[in-house]
Image: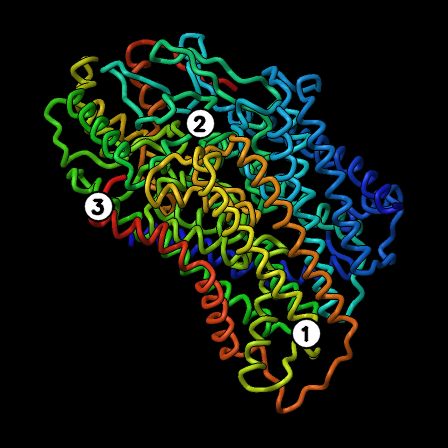
């Protein structure tokens, strides 16, 4: 019985220490050191917050880069994958459908050029990055819609490419939001990161 | 196998290898109350806490007292968590105006977080208030792994011939000397990588496509740090560590992977220091380590080869990217998933339901064995359980009385170890059998064929192993699963832990027998081989039939392009 009282006292003391002091302490330091990241890496265009660099959003305009397909329709507050198993016919239908869409939106592209990540939906449904191959296949479409030259778009991709960290980790890829920010800047819009 | 993958793996494995010794030695100092460098920042705090609780470092407990304190404290937590989750709508820090949880979901969540399982029948970002996230659930992610670790520490003390110690002292020290300092460091690294840490409300963004998008935020980084350091695995959001807000880069992915392994692996060496049998600690580490490598290979190669049915569409490359995030790469994804299954964390950086059959075999192996380092303390106890059983089997084969650490292994120890071993498959197989024979259980299945069986089996295995990850397709929010899995997590947690605690005490009470030329040595490669073999054979005998009906059947049908 005395130990039950000890349990209660332990619970209260540590609820304050770990449930309150700890998060508020690291929150304070985190916001001083990394104000942009701690607030969600938000981006403003012409004064309006358009989204987070970490969260993919539905961009269907031909003049913008498109992210990977999403099983949750890019719902920021409902992250998730398709959860389709490897032998589910719905998986094959979904991949085929996404492939058809890529081919029809990007005339001249053939299936043999399309990387799997371009037509298979991610685990979060919010994957903010695309592979370099994915981005390059979108160049002709965007050039046509925006008047930017292929070379300019290629430069944007090269400039924004996130290589492997320390040459070791991850994959070469590019952030869709950052690419689209550049396109918008080129069109004369003002882009700021929200600190 | 790409160079990036090889290097990613080498870096993670090297960190584990380098840290095992210092962490084990540091833990041994802390839990024998010797001075360490953290005395200055935390010593005064602990003394105050001990005074408030009314314990001291010298107040030892018996196994029974220790066990009752452990269960009693857990009971306090589960009731408190249930209550607070039910009324989160009237508590502070609720900018999204989340309503209180219904009774079944509150029970399932309270049971799952208190048992360090962190199975989630809800999506965090649209169910929980900020208070519930950091005041209730993140808090439990500190203290519940600390409680499991405390029991492990008590058993190690017993095995080393020391008194068990005091539960509340151990609980406090695991929090202040291991989890909290590491969590502060890891949180700040993660914020730097892009994980939000704020009390600001969800943000309504007006997207480039002219729509609106609600972007969740919150105290995510502080959650993420303890989620992994404590082998908890509950996600702040539904997609867990696959969500870019929880795990934004290849670097954060590696940090989270390493965070999971530091303490469970260090715990093996802690045992070596405490008992003075470092060679034995290395032997056990080698056995768990080789099982880890097998799991890692299984989780990687099938995914790189890709799904043959999708490959036949003729895309540019092979490789299964369904339910995977680009930024981690195949190498980063596979080591994260192996770690989460080996250390029973249960956070995920990809969608397990969409992995290929042989890769899911790796996930099942991790949960079946539950001792490939496992959760800190608890995983080690499972390893000791297999050691006792193996020693007993060896003793039978050569006709000698089995001994471990100079103590005779007799009926009582073998019985307790067998109980601890058998509870696990009992919960998994009986639970799955009930589910597939009831309409309520079958209702939760999402994918057809063997994958559907796998979803149910995965759910019960994850609950019994206190892992908490899922084949996400399973309808975990159905009342059947909320109740059934809520019960399984509780039995899975406490029954085997109590058995091991009693086993520790029973060994402590025995006289040490001097080593003779007839003593079987447990710190040799020969023993490592036999232990490895015994672990594989015992588990294969138990689980091979259900594996044959699940992932193995699916593998062959997938090769034949069969769809369900």
The residue positioned 18% from the left and 20% from the top of the image is A105
Q: Which mark is residue B308?
A: 3
Residue B323, located in which quarter of the rendered image?
top left
Q: Which mark is residue B438?
A: none
Residue B243, located in which quarter of the rendered image?
top left
> In screen coordinates, is B309 left or right of A74?
left
Label 2: how many residues lie within 10 Å, few (<14), some (14-19) or many (20+)? many
Q: Secondary structure at mark 1?
A: helix
Task: State yes or no: discs 1 and 2 in contact (Cβ < 8 Å).
Answer: no
The residue positioned 59% from the left and 36% from the top of the image is B483
Which residue is label 2 attached to? A79
Query: How far across and down, in percent of the image, does residue B500 sit?
Result: 68, 61
Label 3: how many residues lie within 10 Å, few (<14), some (14-19) or many (20+)? some
Q: Give above or below for B408 relative to B366.
A: below
- Whether marks 1 and 3 lie on the same chain: yes
Which quadrant of the figure contains the C terminus of chain B? top left
> In screen coordinates, is B144 left or right of B205?
right
Task: State yes or no: discs 2 and 3 in contact (Cβ < 8 Å).
Answer: no
Closer to us: B48 or B167: B167
How far apart are labels 2 and 3 at the CA level?
28 Å
The residue positioned 86% from the left and 43% from the top of the image is B53
The residue positioned 54% from the left and 50% from the top of the image is B344
């Amino acid at each position: 019985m005395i130990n039950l009282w000890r349990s209660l006292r332990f619970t209260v003391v540590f609820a304050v220490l770990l449930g309150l002091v700890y998060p508020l302490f690291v929150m304070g330091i985190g916001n001083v050191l990394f104000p942009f990241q701690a607030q969600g890496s938000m981006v403003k265009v012409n004064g309006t917050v358009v989204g987070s660099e970490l969260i993919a959003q539905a961009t269907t305009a031909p003049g913008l880069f498109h992210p990977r397909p999403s099983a949750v329709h890019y719902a920021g507050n409902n992250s998730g994958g398709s959860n389709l198993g490897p032998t589910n016919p719905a998986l094959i239908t979904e991949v085929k459908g996404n492939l058809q869409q890529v081919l029809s939106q990007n005339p001249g592209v053939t299936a043999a050029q399309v990387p799997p990540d371009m037509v298979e939906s991610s685990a979060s449904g919010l994957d903010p990055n695309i592979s370099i191959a994915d981005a390059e296949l979108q160049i002709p479409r965007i050039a046509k819609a925006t008047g930017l030259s292929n070379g300019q778009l290629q430069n944007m991709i090269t400039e924004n490419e996130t290589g492997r960290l320390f040459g070791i980790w991850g994959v070469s890829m590019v952030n869709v939001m950052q690419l689209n920010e550049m396109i918008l800047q080129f069109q004369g819009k003002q882009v700021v990161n929200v600190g | 196998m790409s160079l990036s993958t090889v290097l990613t793996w080498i870096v993670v494995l090297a960190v584990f290898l380098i840290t095992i010794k210092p962490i084990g030695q540091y833990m041994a100092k802390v839990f024998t109350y010797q001075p360490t460098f953290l005395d200055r920042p935390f010593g005064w705090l602990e003394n105050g806490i001990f005074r408030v609780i009314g314990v001291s470092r010298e107040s030892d407990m018996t196994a029974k007292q220790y066990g009752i304190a452990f269960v009693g404290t857990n009971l306090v937590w589960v009731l408190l968590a249930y209550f607070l989750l039910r009324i989160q709508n009237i508590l502070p820090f609720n900018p999204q105006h989340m309503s209180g949880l219904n009774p079944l979901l509150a029970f399932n969540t309270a049971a799952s977080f208190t048992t360090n399982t962190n199975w989630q029948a809800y999506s965090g970002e649209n169910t929980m208030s900020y208070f519930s996230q950091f005041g209730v659930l993140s808090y439990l992610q500190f203290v519940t792994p600390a409680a499991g670790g405390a029991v492990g520490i008590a058993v190690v003390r017993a095995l080393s011939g020391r008194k068990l110690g005091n539960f509340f002292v151990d609980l406090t020290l695991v929090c202040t000397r291991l989890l909290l300092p590491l969590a502060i460091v890891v949180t700040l690294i993660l914020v730097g990588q892009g994980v939000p840490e704020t009390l600001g409300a969800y943000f309504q963004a007006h997207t480039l496509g002219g729509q609106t998008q609600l972007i969740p935020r919150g105290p995510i980084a502080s959650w993420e740090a303890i989620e992994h350091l404590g082998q908890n695995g509950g996600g702040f959001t539904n997609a867990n560590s696959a969500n870019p807000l929880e795990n934004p880069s290849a670097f954060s992915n590696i940090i989270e992977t390493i965070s999971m392994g530091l303490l469970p692996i260090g715990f093996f060496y802690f045992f070596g220091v405490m008992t003075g049998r470092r060679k034995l600690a290395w032997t056990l580490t080698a056995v768990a380590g080789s099982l880890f490598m097998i799991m890692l290979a299984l989780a990687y190669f099938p995914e790189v080869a890709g799904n043959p049915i999708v490959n036949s569409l003729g895309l540019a490359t092979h490789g299964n990217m369904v339910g995977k995030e680009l930024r981690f790469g195949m190498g980063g994804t596979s080591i994260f998933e192996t770690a989460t299954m080996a250390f029973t964390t249960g956070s995920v950086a990809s969608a397990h339901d969409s992995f290929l059959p042989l890769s899911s075999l790796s996930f099942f192996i991790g949960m079946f064995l539950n001792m490939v380092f496992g959760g800190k303390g608890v995983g080690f106890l499972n390893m000791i359980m297999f050691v006792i059983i193996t020693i007993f089997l060896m003793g039978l084969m050569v006709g000698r009385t089995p001994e471990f650490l100079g103590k005779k292994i007799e009926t009582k120890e073998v019985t307790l170890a067998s109980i601890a071993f058998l509870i696990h498959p009992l919960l998994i197989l009986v639970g799955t059998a009930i589910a597939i024979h009831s309409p309520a259980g079958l209702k939760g299945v999402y994918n057809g064929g063997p994958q559907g069986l796998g979803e149910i089996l995965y759910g019960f295995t994850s609950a019994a192993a206190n892992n908490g990850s899922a084949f996400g397709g399973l309808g975990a929010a159905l009342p059947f699963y909320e109740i059934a899995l809520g019960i399984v997590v509780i039995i899975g947690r406490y029954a085997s832990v109590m058995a091991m605690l009693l086993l520790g005490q029973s060994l402590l009470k025995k006289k040490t027998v001097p080593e003779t030329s007839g003593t079987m040595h447990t710190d040799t490669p020969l023993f490592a081989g036999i232990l490895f073999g015994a672990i594989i054979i015992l588990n294969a005998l138990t689980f091979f039939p259900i594996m044959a009906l699940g992932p193995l059947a699916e593998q062959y049908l997938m090769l034949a392009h069969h769809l369900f």
